[in-house]
Image (cartoon, grey):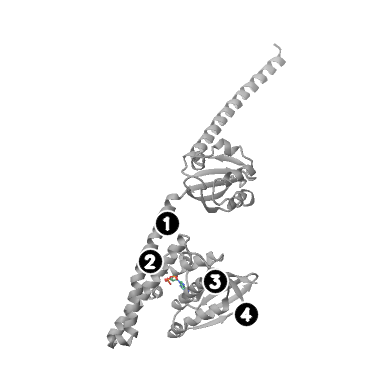
Amino acid sequence: MDERETAIEGALHLSEVRLQGALQRAETYYAQFERTKSQLRAIMDASQEAMLFLAPGGRPLKVNTRFSGFFGVDDTTVLSQTPAQLTVLLKGLFVDGEALDRWLSWSTLDREHIFREQQVQGRRERQDFDLSSLPVTNVDQTYLGRLYVWHDVTQERAVDRMKSEFVSLVSHELRTPLTSIQGYVDLLLTDEDVGTLTALQREFLGIALSNAHRLGRLINDFLDLSHIESGKLVLHCEPFPLVQLIREVSSSFHLSLAAKQQDVTLHLPDPALMVYGDANRMVQVLTNLLSNAHKYTPVGGHLEIAVEIKGTLAHISVIDTGIGLSGEEQAQLFTRFYRAENAATRAIQGTGLGLTITRSLVEMHGGELQVSSTPGVGSIFCFTLPVVK
Ligand code: ADP
């Protein structure tokens, strides 16, 4: 073997060794990759939730075994669907098929937000689900697709329904005897045939009546809340004159405002303005907001109700120069039974249910209740109603 041949052989041997090394490394990487893949699969399958991962165009890339368990469709079938076929397949699984187009299109349209929906399974025992849809991005921020996660909340919903029914039943049972107590105490105070009362008896009966009214308001709040939560509260919407309704509500506060030397200014548009909603429920919304503005504003304060028309919506604001709310307090404002922790609130009667109910009523009208407030300066509560053209 001459020198050249020896060199070639040496180079070939080196290449072979390198190739062997590369092959070994590739095998190790492949084994690692397979391990990671099966770990990922095992983690997804161990989840109590059904999971489906869609590529940005809507093609199914991964599905876990819980999905088959919940919905009775095996993974091979799911993964072999085109986006259009998948939509049809999923539409057959849930009661609200219409919403489905929207939440499947999230994978293509939105790369940032987390969406949540409630869903009810259309077949067999009608399970309730909370569906979350989360964008998935790579470490380098490349959008990989969307993960859809179904959490079975059938049990929680059943307990919620039982609780609402219980609260509703108890409230009804309490209301009947309370109405009778209110009626008889009222008679004692107003009916001359009952006999004359001493000043002290009149005072005590007055206290009893005011507490019976307070209890009545609490029971009504409980009933409203349980009806809202169980979906039994039905709105009776029709066009109604907003300006007239606001004038009526604000006049009903005449005496209480005078007692605190507060005045209310109304900034109202043309009285012919008609809006669409449930007028009785709007009385309740405005009464709650005005009552709060009155309660949480010191003696001599100033209140305002303003209506502004922007496009197809009437923006209704209830404004006060009261104690106001910090950012932290505002964040908790719509939680049931929440009352801000301050001396003024402690001294004022309230249940902490009014705003929760008010917000739900506004939302049932398709609006949103917004608050902006500064401690020591005042608050603005604003909501919208559709204008009837
Ligand atoms: P309630 O007035 O019966 O306590 P709400 O649900 O109507 O219940 O209000 C919850 C809490 O929000 C009140 O206890 C009070 O602390 C705060 N709040 C509501 N409205 C105002 C307002 N206009 N100004 C300051 N604080 C308010």
Q: Do the residues labelled 2 and 1 touch (CB within 8 Å)?
A: no
Check disc 1 and give the amino acid type.
Arg
Q: Are marks 2 and 3 in contact (CB under 8 Å)?
A: no
The residue lying toward the viewer, choosing from 274 and 289, is: 274
Q: Mark 4 points at which residue?
A: 270
The residue lying toward the viewer, choosing from 159 and 233, is: 233
- For numbered disc 3, what is the local secondary structure? strand
Question: Which is more N-terminal, label 4 or label 3?
Answer: 4
Question: Which is more N-terminal, label 1 or label 4?
Answer: 1
Spatial separation of the CA atoms under disc 1 and disc 3: 31 Å
Vertical order, 83 against 236 (above or below): above
Check disc 4 and give the amino acid type.
Asp
Q: How crowded is mark 4: few (under 14 residues within 10 Å), some or many (20 or more)?
A: few
Q: Do the residues labelled 4 and 2 touch (CB within 8 Å)?
A: no
The residue lying toward the viewer, choosing from 126 and 59, is: 126
Question: Which is more N-terminal, label 2 or label 4?
Answer: 2
Q: Residues within 10 Å of mark 1 (few under 14, many from 20)?
A: some
Q: Name the residue under label 3.
A: 382
Check disc 2 and give the amino acid type.
His
Mark 1 or mark 3, which is nearer to you? 1
Mark 2 or mark 3, which is nearer to you? 2
Q: Name the residue under label 2.
A: 172
Image-based side of 143 in relation to 359, left or right: right
Spatial separation of the CA atoms under disc 2 and disc 1: 16 Å
Q: Which quadrant of the figure contains the C terminus?
A: bottom right
